[in-house]
Image (spheres, rainbow, N blue to C red):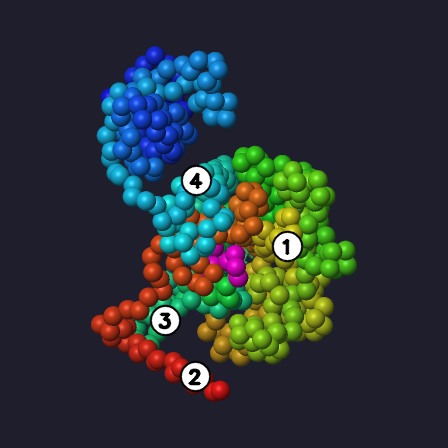
Amino acid sequence: MKRTLVLETLKQVGKEVKLQGWVDTKRDHGKVTFIDFRDKTGKVQCVGYKMMGELTTESVIELIGLVKERPERLVNKNLPTGTVEIDVKQYTILNKAKELPIGVDTDGLEIKEEARLKYRYLDLRRERMQNIIRMRSKFFKAISDELHSQDFVEIETPMLTESTKEGARDFIVPSRFNPGKFYALPQSPQQYKQLLMTAGFEKYFQIARCIRDEDLRADRGFEFTQLDLEMSFVDRETVMKTVEDLVKKSVKAVGAKLQKEEFPVFTYAEAIEKFGADKFDLRTDQEKEEGVLAFAWVIKFPFFKKVDKADVAEVRDGKSGWTFTHNPFSAPEPEFEQDHLDKKNIGKIITAQYDLVCNGYEAGGGSIRAHKAELLKSTFEIMGYSEEEIQHSVGHMLEAFEVGTPPHGGIALGLDRLVMILAGEESLKETIAFPMSSTGRTSVMDGPSAVSGEQLKELHIKVVKKEKKENKK
Ligand code: ASP
């Protein structure tokens, strides 16, 4: 007998069906036992006479039963399958559930993070999490379908790479074959996507995982997912228009309502003057209640800023006391190109950067890039890099920019954040199947963990134990 899905039972009245899924709830009345039976399509009431009393909630069962129309007065209007019920003839327990360590029948927000992440496979069973993760999948599909339809090529870039200069601290991985040397995990595919433009792909995208060793915040882990794209022979307006259309289509595909069909554009100076920040919320209170999305663009950011001495990555990148505000691979706006090359009026140089803002959050950012070697070189010179340091950091980019690299620009959108906004959630963790905890520990599995002496030896690594500071009283 073929499996019938819960929602399909509506069309099977009078027939015998085989269902496979979970015991959602059980009400045992002695002679009669009712269960709400659940699969990926929903729930349906099943009735057993002198059977099913032994079932525990969340057990996986298979049952065969007759689909019956419910009498008018017993119709459950709260359930899509509320007009039918299954008269169970026989069932088999496929996997018996013990008492669960966490409940799965609430929205879960009342349960401690540690327990939710330790038992994430259970936590994900709750309806709220099922809806978010399924919506995320639908949203990603809408994005990728649209980009494919516009001739974008989906290309993967390496995970084991060299430092990508995104302004955060790198995660590093020891190389067994090169004792004492390390790979860096990508903070973004920035340089590779630009090299794909040199390679002639013209339109690239990737739903990319980025890894940055940043200080953890309650809602942020070390990994995140971004839609990364890059295009050749484009100006700022073309990229912004492409992204705006894409964002509109894909958020509508998951039912979102937009405040404005055309996203307003603010300069950085206007944004600071008007909102006191470069991310802001344009919604009215009523729009907030209705879950409306208010997107806006911010352009004309300063290219450089003074190094924040408390920020390790900034101090490392900004050797001269100047560092980039957004992206060292950006071009200056055309009218600032000469100053950029002359390293004059540094604080006044404006970058061809654009940020997408949504409901008070930064939803993404990108730029038209420096595609000429002397311009990129000048950026690093302004930050105080020596010729040797420049060659070491971006020599490969400078080389690529001398063999026919088209003008290009792109963007990256933070997809976890967009899903969070779409789902009306307040933490990025609610949008990721297996997020990291607030203290940087992995879901379900116990990472980071110690490795064996044997592994360390192979990697030529010695762990120096941190001396415990003596408690002076
Ligand atoms: N690589 C940048 C980032 O991840 C985005 C971009 O400029 O495309 O922030």
- Look at discs 4 and 2 and give the one toward the viewer: 4
Q: Is residue 66 left or right of residue 115?
A: left
Ligand 1 within 8 Å of the CB at mark 1? no
Report the Cα–Cα distance between label 1 and label 3: 33 Å
Direction bottom: furthest residue:
472
* Residue at x 64%, y 58% (from the top left corner): 352
Q: Nearer the viewer, mark 1 or mark 4?
A: 4
Binning the other alpha carbons within 10 Å of mark 4 as few (below 14), some (14 to 19) or many (20 upward) gives: few
Please state which amino acid type lies under the numbered disc 2: Lys
- In the rendering, at what x and y percent does residue 241 appear? 63, 44
Magenta extent = 217-224
Residue position marked by numbered label 3 in the rendering: 182
Contact, CB < 8 Å: mark 3 with mark 4?
Answer: no
Say whether residue 403 is visible: no
Q: Amino acid at mark 4?
A: Asp
Q: Which residue is mark 1?
A: 354
Q: What type of secondary structure mainly makes up the magenta span?
A: loop
Q: Is 260 covered by the magenta stretch?
A: no
Name the residue type under label 3. Answer: Phe
How far across and down, in percent of the image, does residue 434 sit? 41, 51
Mark 2 packing: few (<14 Cα in 10 Å), some, or many (20+)? few
Of 121 and 299, the residue lying toward us: 121
Between label 2 and label 3, give the one nearer the viewer: 2
- According to the image, label 4 marks what residue? 105
Q: Is residue 94 placed above or below 312 in the rendered structure?
A: above
Q: Position of residue 160 (x, y in %)?
A: 37, 62
